[in-house]
C-alpha cells in the first residue's frame, strides 16, 4: 500500500556533515561513570525529540492530507494517541528527575524535514525503532529497580508504536524475534542529525556522536542476506592507521555483532549483508551497521563511523 523505500532516505536526508578523516587508532577518552540521572536525561532527550516530532507532524498535516497519502481516519486518530503517549513519557521522566533532585534537560530545536506525509511517517518509523533500541540498550546500566521497571514499561509501548507504524507502511510489524540494543553513543549518533540546537542551560550528557554513515540511495529496494550494498562516508574517509588493514562492517544484533569485510569505493564502502552464525539473532527489520577495524567486538573504542540504518527483509 505505502512504499517502504522512504525509511533509508528519511534518515539519509538529515545526515550531518562529518569530520574530514577518521583514524581508527585515534585516542578516545574513557567516559565517566554513568548515573541513573544521566540515563533518565538521555531518555528524556529522546522523548523530547519524539514529542516535538509528532506535534509538528500533526500541526503541519491535516486528516485530509493523510487521507490523500493513503492513510485512513483510524491511522490519523492513532497517530494522535501516539503523540499523547510521547507527551506523557516526557512528563513522567521530567517528574522522576525532579524527584531525584537532578536537573532535567529541556526540549531542543529540531529539523525533521517534514516535506510530505509519507516521508513523515517513514521518519516516525525510524524514531520509534531507535527508541526501542535505546531503552533496550540502556536497561543494563540502570541501577534503580523502580527506574528499570518504568523504562521497561515505556519500552513495550514504544515497541507497539513501532510495530503499528511499520505495518501501516507495508513493512513487517515484527520482522525479527529479537529487538536490537544500541549504546548511548550509537543512539545519539542517529538522533543528532535531527537536533539543530539545545538550550545552553541543559545539563551535559555523557554522549558523543560518531561520524555519520548512511545507506546509499542506489542500494536495492529489497535488501536481504547476500545482497551487496554500499555505505556512504560523505565528506570524510575511514582508514586504518597503517593504511592497509581491513575495515569491517558490523551488523548489530542482540546476540553479538555479525561482521562483513568492507571494500573501499569512492565515497564509502561496499559489502555483502552477511549470513548469521547458527543460533544468532537474525539480521532483519530496522538494522544498524557500524564501520570498525575489528572483527571480534564492537565498542566505542573500535567504532569508526555509524550506525547506518538499513531495512532488511526478513528471511521468512
Image (cartoon, rainbow, N blue to C red):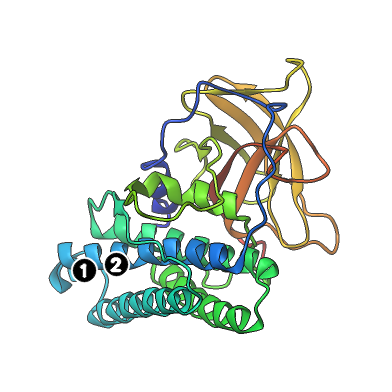
Picture disc at residue 54: 2
Which residue is at a point 57% across and 41% down the rendered structure image?
A: 306
Residue 248 at x, y percent in the picture: 73, 35
Is residue 20 shown left or right of residue 73?
A: right
The answer to whether 275 is drawn above or below residue 142 in the figure is: above
Quadrant of residue 174 in the image? Answer: bottom right
Which residue is at a point 75% across and 51% down the rendered structure image?
A: 257
Quadrant of residue 127 in the image? Answer: bottom left
Mark 2 neighbour density, 10 Å: few (under 14) some (14–19) many (20 or more)? many
Question: Extreme front residue here?
Answer: 101
Picture disc at residue 220: none
Q: Are marks 1 and 2 in contact (CB under 8 Å)?
A: yes
Which residue is at a point 40% across and 61% down the rendered structure image?
A: 105
Q: Nearer the viewer, residue 224 or 277?
A: 277
> In which quadrant will I find the C terminus?
bottom right
Disc 2 secondary structure class: helix
The residue tagged 1 is: 58
The answer to whether 275 is drawn above or below residue 121 in the figure is: above
Instruction: Decide if residue 8 is in sight here.
Output: no
Q: Nearer the viewer, residue 170 or 199?
A: 199
Question: In whole angstroms, how far apart are the C-alphas of marks 1 and 2?
Answer: 6 Å
Amino acid at each position: 500500500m505505502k512504499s517502504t523505500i522512504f525509511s533509508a532516505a528519511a534518515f539519509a536526508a538529515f545526515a550531518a556533515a562529518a569530520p574530514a578523516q577518521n583514524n581508527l587508532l585515534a585516542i578516545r577518552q574513557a567516559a565517566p561513570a554513568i548515573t541513573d540521572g544521566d540515563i533518565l536525561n538521555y531518555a528524556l532527550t529522546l522523548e523530547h525529540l519524539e514529542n516535538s516530532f509528532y506535534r509538528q507532524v500533526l500541526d503541519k498535516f491535516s486528516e485530509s492530507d493523510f487521507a490523500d497519502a493513503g492513510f485512513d481516519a483510524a491511522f490519523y486518530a492513532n497517530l494522535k494517541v501516539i503523540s499523547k503517549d510521547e507527551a506523557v513519557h516526557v512528563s513522567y521522566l521530567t517528574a522522576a528527575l525532579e524527584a531525584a533532585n537532578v536537573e532535567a534537560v529541556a526540549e531542543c530545536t529540531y529539523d525533521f524535514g517534514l516535506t510530505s506525509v509519507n516521508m513523515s511517517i517513514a521518519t516516525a518509523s525510524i524514531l520509534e525503532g531507535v527508541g526501542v533500541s535505546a531503552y533496550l540498550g540502556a536497561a543494563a546500566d540502570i541501577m534503580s529497580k523502580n527506574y528499570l521497571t518504568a523504562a521497561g514499561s515505556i519500552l513495550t509501548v514504544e515497541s507497539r508504536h513501532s510495530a503499528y507504524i511499520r505495518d501501516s507502511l507495508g513493512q513487517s510489524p515484527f520482522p525479527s524475534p529479537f529487538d536490537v540494543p544500541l549504546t548511548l553513543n550509537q543512539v545519539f549518533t542517529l538522533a543528532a542529525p535531527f537536533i539543530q540546537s539545545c538550550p545552553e542551560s541543559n545539563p551535559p550528557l555523557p554522549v558523543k556522536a560518531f561520524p555519520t554513515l548512511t545507506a546509499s540511495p542506489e542500494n536495492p529496494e529489497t535488501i536481504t542476506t547476500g545482497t551487496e550494498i554500499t555505505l556512504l562516508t560523505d565528506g570524510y574517509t575511514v582508514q586504518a592507521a597503517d593504511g592497509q588493514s581491513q575495515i569491517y562492517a558490523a551488523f548489530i544484533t542482540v546476540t553479538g555483532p555479525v561482521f562483513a569485510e568492507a571494500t573501499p569505493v569512492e565515497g564509502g564502502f561496499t559489502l555483502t549483508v552477511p549470513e548469521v552464525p547458527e543460533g544468532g539473532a537474525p539480521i532483519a527489520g530496522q538494522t544498524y551497521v557500524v564501520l570498525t577495524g575489528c572483527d571480534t567486538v564492537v565498542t566505542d573504542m573500535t567504532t569508526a563511523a555509524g550506525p547506518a540504518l538499513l531495512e532488511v527483509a526478513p528471511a521468512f
